[in-house]
Amino acid sequence: MNAIAPGRTRTGITAGVHRDPVLLAAIERRIPLGRFAEPWEQAEAIWFLASPAAGYITGTTLVVDGGLDADLGILPLPGQSF
C-alpha cells in the first residue's frame, strides 16, 4: 500500500485563503515552489503510484507539497515572518 501526503492544494476548502491576499501571500512565501498545488498535480502523483511505473514501490508515502516538508513545514501565522 502506498499513499500521498498532499500539501496546500487549491480546492473549495482553501477558497477562503485565496480570497485573502495577505494570508495567501504569507502561506505561499513559505512554500518553496511559491504556490498552492493544483488538484491535477495531486492526481498525477496518485496515478504514478497506481501505475506500472511504481511497480516496485510499496509501503511508502509520497510527499507532494511543493517542498514544504523539506523546508521543515513551518507556516507563519498572519502578521508573522521568519
Image (cartoon, rainbow, N blue to C red):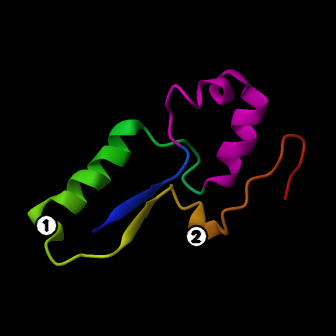
Question: In this rendering, would 44 be left or right of 65?
Answer: left
Q: What span is in magenta?
A: 9-31
Disc 1 secondary structure class:
helix
User: Which residue appears at 73% of the width and 54% of the height?
Assistant: 75
User: Which residue appears at 64% of the width and 67% of the height?
Assistant: 71
For marks 1 and 2, the one nearer the N-term is 1
User: Which residue appears at 58% of the width and 70% of the height?
Assistant: 70
Q: Name above or below for residue 3 compared with residue 39.
A: below
Q: Quadrant of the N terminus?
A: bottom left
Which residue is under mark 1?
A: 53
Question: In this rendering, would 38 be left or right of 80?
Answer: left
Residue furthest to the top: 19
Provide the major secondary structure of the magenta segment: helix
Whole-percent x, y for residue 5 in the image? 46, 58
Whole-percent x, y for residue 81 in the image? 86, 52
Q: Name above or below for residue 8 compared with residue 10.
A: below
Which residue is under mark 2?
A: 70
